[in-house]
Amino acid sequence: YSEYYPSIQNLVEHQIRSPWKHIQSLSILSSKLLKNVFAVLVVLLVYSLASIDSNFTWENMIVLLLTLGQAFFIEYLVHWKWNLFDLSFDSVVKYFACGFFLTTPSAVV
C-alpha cells in the first residue's frame, strides 16, 4: 500500500484526470488483473476464431465482448465521469475483479 498510495494521493490532490496517469499509479495486483483479463480475452478470441469448439463461435465471443462492454461502460460513467476522485482507479479494478470472480461461478451454478 505504501508503495503506490503516494501516487494515488497526488492524483487526488492535484485533480489529475489523465487516464494514463491513473493507470501508471496502479498497484502490482491491479496491473496483473488487467493484464490477465486482456490475455484471457485474446485467448478466447483466438479460440473462437479457430473453430476448435463448435459451441463457442465468433458470435458467442461478440456476446461476451458486448456484455463486458456494457459493464465497462457503466463503470466508466459511474467512476470516471462522475466520481473519479472519490475512489481510486486501483480500488475500482480490485472491486470489479472481485465482483466478477465471485458472481461468475454462482451464475454458472
Image (spheres, helix red, strand yellow):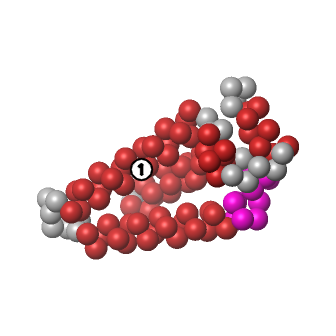
Residue 68 in view, yes or no: yes
Percent x, y for residue 94?
A: 60, 45
Relative to 26, is 96 above or below? below
- Count the marks: 1
Crowd rating for badge 1 (residues with CA inside 10 Å; few <14, some 14–19, many 20+): few
- Which corner quadrant holds the N terminus? top right
Residue 95 in view, yes or no: no
- Whether residue 86 is in magenta: the answer is yes
Label 1 SS: helix
Which contiguous range is marked in magenta? 78-87
- Look at 41% across and 50% down and name the residue there: 38
- Which corner quadrant holds the C terminus? bottom left
- Look at 55% across and 63% down and name the residue there: 72
Q: Is residue 105 left or right of residue 31?
A: left
Q: Residue furthest top?
A: 2
Determine which quarter of the picture holds residue 60: bottom left
Q: Is residue 74 left or right of residue 51?
A: right
Residue 66 vs residue 55, the one in the foreground: 66
- Whether residue 33 is in magenta: the answer is no
Residue marked by disc 1: 38
Percent x, y for residue 63?
A: 37, 72
- Look at 52% across and 70% down and name the residue there: 70
Percent x, y for residue 98?
A: 55, 48
- Look at 62% across and 48% down and name the residue there: 20
Identified by mark 1, the residue type is Phe
